[in-house]
Image (cartoon, rainbow, N blue to C red):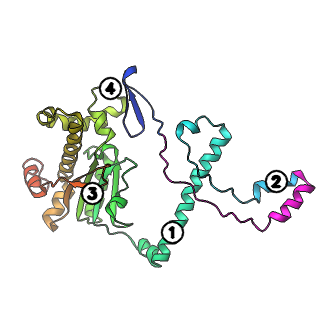
Amino acid sequence: MRLSLGFGIKWDAAVGGGVKPFKASGTLARSFSQAASSPQPFTASFARKQRLSPLSHNFASSRLQPRRPYSSRIMSTEELDKQPPQEVKKYLQQSHDRIFESNKKWAAEQKAKNPDFFSHLNAGQSPEYLWIGCSDSRIPAEAITGLGPGEMFIHRNIANLVCSTDLNVMSVVNYAVRHLHVKHIVVCGHYGCGGVKAAMTPQDLGLLNPWLRNIRDVYRLHEAELDGIKDEEAKYNRLVELNVVEQARNVIKTAAIQQSYAKSGYPIVHGWVFGFKDGLLKDLEIDFEGQLKDIQKIYNLTS
């Protein structure tokens, strides 16, 4: 049995759970930008030089000819692996260049809509929200929330975990609260999370074990409820939700949150889940004040 974990590996039960590179197919969904089709001014004179000197043709073609239009066809990883090295190199260059072409187009569009757009970005940021989400490439935080640049401070990792020993996420929370003064902190998971699915698998997954242990601890805390759910998909979805709730609790345990809320009445911590089937966010309606009061019986860091 081969289990796709969704974040760069496949687990193969038939070989004892060894971790192998994951080859995703069709992950690039957008076609390459088309370059201008009109010939460049030097093309005609270059054709005359070509007839006179093949050497000059070879030299000039590498320096003077316009870049070929990007291919509109996207290769799967499996198909690309079958190509000769030169074709792979060309394809990688095209996929690299596509980003810069898209960036130029985006920048031009923003400037056309609002001439002061980049002046405002350059002035600094004051986001209302901190988003702690999963690294899954299918969940662009700004896009699914309708927010734009400068409106959301974002941190992402596998399975949207908030671990007190992870200096990365702890630094993000501290900076967002104490320096950016965000008003809302959102922990957002998603149904179909590969990290949560892997944590439900009782196998040694090597380097992933310490990270997945945090999700397995969530299962342990809610074992009675989860074991009572007979449908595997429903159990999986519920663990996704419970993981979000527990990670939100971990955010509330931090000194930055407790002290800022005691002083200013914000930020508020929320737990949401995104669904691929309908594209909607589900609010788990975490009782922030109730959770804070309960947590501070043991984790009171306000003084």
Span of residues in magenta: 25-54
The secondary structure making up most of the magenta span is: loop
Residue at the spot of label 1: 107
Residue 38: quarter of image: bottom right
Of labels 3 and 2, the one closer to you: 2
On residue 59, which mark appears?
A: 2
Residue 17 location, x and y as percent?
Answer: 37, 24
What is the three-letter code of the residue carrying label 4?
Answer: Asp
> Do the residues under discs 2 and 1 have CB atoms within 8 angstroms?
no
Instruction: Give the SS element for disc 1.
Output: helix
Give the alpha-carbon distance from disc 3 to disc 2, as whole Å: 56 Å
Q: Seen from this angle, which residue lies furthest top?
A: 15
Residue 88 location, x and y as percent?
Answer: 62, 41
Callout 1: 10 Å neighbours few (<14), some, many (20+)? Answer: few
On residue 174, which mark appears?
A: 3
Residue at the spot of label 4: 204
Give the alpha-carbon distance from disc 4 to disc 1, as whole Å: 46 Å
- Taking the image as shown, residue 18 lies to the left or right of residue 213, namely right
Residue 43 painted magenta = yes
Residue 41 painted magenta = yes
Give the alpha-carbon distance from disc 3 to disc 4, as whole Å: 33 Å
What is the three-letter code of the residue carrying label 1?
Answer: Ala
Ranked by sequence position, the earlier of labels 1 and 3 is: 1
Report whether residue 229 is seen. yes
